[in-house]
Image (cartoon, rainbow, N blue to C red):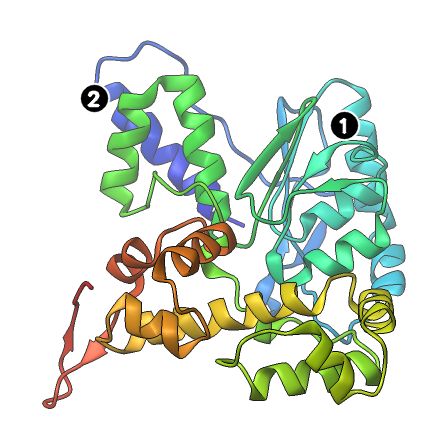
Amino acid sequence: MFAVPDLLTMATHVATAHGSVQPGYEVSVISPRRCVIASGGSVIDVPAVRPVDVLIVPGFELSPTLDLDATLADLGPEVASIRSQAASGTAVVSICVGAFLVAESGLLGGHEATTSWLFADRFADRYADVRLRPEKLVVTDRGVTTTAAFSAMYDFALQFIREHDGPRVARSTARIALVDDARSTQASYVDSGLIPAVGREFSLGVKRWLDQNLSARYDLPTLAQEFHVSTRTMLRRFGDETGETPLAYLQTVRVRRAKHLLETTDRTVATIAADVGYRDSGTFSGIFARHTGRRPREYRAIFHRCCDHHGSTRRTEA
């Protein structure tokens, strides 16, 4: 909750040091409830809702088993405040799953938006009229801004500082705070293995078979024969249960495996490509980039952590 105010305060000091005469940021925490419970159970007394220029909506505790209908109903006063602030001309920004609250207020219908990749499927199912961009870190559409998971609040704050104080102040603030100001996608961080399974028995069986034959050449007729159905039935049943094709799922799993190997081994990109079923490393690199937003070597340069025989951490590149 307080990360954005901290970064904006820091930016004010940086801007002043650069000779800026622009007014600083006035930041306060407001709520329709005079007492709120923050993450970790901390109880905070806050002022009542009042007019502001920008309303930043934080996320809330969300888990795969949470009764979302009941939770959003309990947050009705917050949803009403968001709607009221927007009606008065206030710019609205959501952090992480705060996008659910903004969507409940009716502000995202027909708009592009993003949210945490972990709950993107759940969001898309609930708000079919929102054009979800789950790969994006920050999306602004017609005055409403949504961001990806927790740390994307920094990407928004730096964008806000850049617009208010210019790129020099934003860059300096990012350097002082040790915040990456060059990110453009959350795709590199997605681990589809953490996303709750929503498939039914047929698609789960197909997924298990594909997982176990990860490096084998993909052949739809062979896959269909394995499950005693026609290719047309395979595509229809798998698509009905998952919303994608078996090949699309296989590519996702192969990329996830490749990410792990790039992070934890010193194998060459060509070797890793072969390990996950691609004989042509160029084809593999293109698919990997489409899924993660980065080429394999670039991904390894950022995420590779490999321990030597003495247990120390070192970085290598293919």
Relative to 112, say whether 61 is above or below. below
Q: For this view, does 55 lie left or right of residue 121?
A: left
Quadrant housing residue 60: bottom right
Earlier in the chain: of badge 2 and badge 1, it is: 2
So how many labels did they put on this image? 2
- Residue type marked 1: Gln
Observer able to see residue 180: yes
Q: Is residue 263 visible?
A: no
148 in relation to 239, above or below: above
**Label 1: how many Cα within 10 Å (few below 14, some 14–19, many 20+):** some
Q: Position of residue 266 (x, y in %)?
A: 21, 75
Q: Is residue 242 above or below residue 293?
A: below
Give whichever of 259, 268 is nearer the camera. 268
Give the x, y percent position of residue 272: 34, 73
Q: Quadrant of residue 163?
A: top left
Q: Nearer the viewer, residue 231 or 200?
A: 231
Q: CA distance from mark 2 to mark 1?
A: 34 Å
- Element assignment for label 2: helix
Secondary structure category for the residue under label 1: helix
Quick one: which residue is furthest to the front in this view? 221
Seen at 85% across and 81% down, the residue is 229
Q: Is residue 254 left or right of residue 307?
A: right
Q: Of 68 and 114, which appears nearest the observer?
A: 114
Residue bearing mark 2 = 17
Q: Quadrant of the C terminus?
A: bottom left
Residue at 70% across, 22% down: 142
Specify the amino acid type for callout 2. Ala
Outermost residue to the left: 310
Q: Would you name the residue on which mark 1 appears?
A: 85
